[in-house]
């Protein structure tokens, strides 16, 4: 599986995802705004993270693509939906 860290509206990432879908290659795309809009849980002991009810096992990720991923500062009131164990 490929982990794609991008931002919404990035057409180049959309084109790459079209090819990944064509070749039926597994991937997960996380956009920078997902951290603001979706709940995120990380369990480092069990080696998985959960974003918006989708559990991703870290050992299943064989490659990562970091493209135009930019996070703004997370304000204290926004931290309430991020859990790290």
Image (spheres, rainbow, N blue to C red):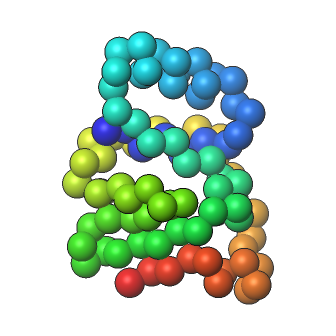
**Which residue: 34% across, 33% down?**
26
Task: Tell me the quarter of the picture where residue 1 sits.
Answer: top left
Q: Position of residue 37 (x, y in %)?
A: 70, 61
**Drawn side of residue 13 relative to residue 23, left or right:** right
Camera-nearest residue between 57 and 53? 53
Q: Is residue 21 above or below residue 63?
A: above
In the rendered structure, the answer to whether residue 84 lies left or right of residue 10 reads left
Residue 25 spot, x, y in % from top left: 33, 25
Picture mark count:
0
Image quarter where the C terminus lies is bottom left
Q: Quadrant of residue 9?
A: top right
Q: Identify the residue shown where x is 42% and y is 13%.
A: 22
Q: Nearer the viewer, residue 56 or 63?
A: 56
Query: Residue at 52% of width from left, 18% of height from top?
Result: 18
Q: Is residue 1 left or right of residue 20?
A: left
Residue 11 picture location, percent across and down: 69, 24
User: Furthest residue to the front?
Assistant: 53
Q: What residue appears at the point 70 percent right and 54 percent down from the top-left corner? A: 33
Q: Position of residue 29 (x, y in %)?
A: 52, 42
Against 7, residue 32 (above or below) is below
Location of residue 19 with respect to 4 vertically, above or below: above
């Amino acid at each position: 599986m490929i982990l794609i860290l991008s931002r919404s509206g990035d057409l180049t990432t959309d084109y790459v995802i079209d090819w990944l879908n064509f070749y039926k290659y597994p991937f997960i795309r996380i956009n920078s705004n997902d951290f603001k809009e979706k709940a995120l849980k990380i369990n480092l002991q069990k080696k998985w993270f959960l974003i918006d009810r989708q559990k991703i096992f870290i050992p299943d990720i064989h490659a990562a693509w970091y493209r135009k991923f930019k996070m703004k500062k997370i304000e204290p009131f926004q931290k309430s939906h991020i859990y790290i164990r």
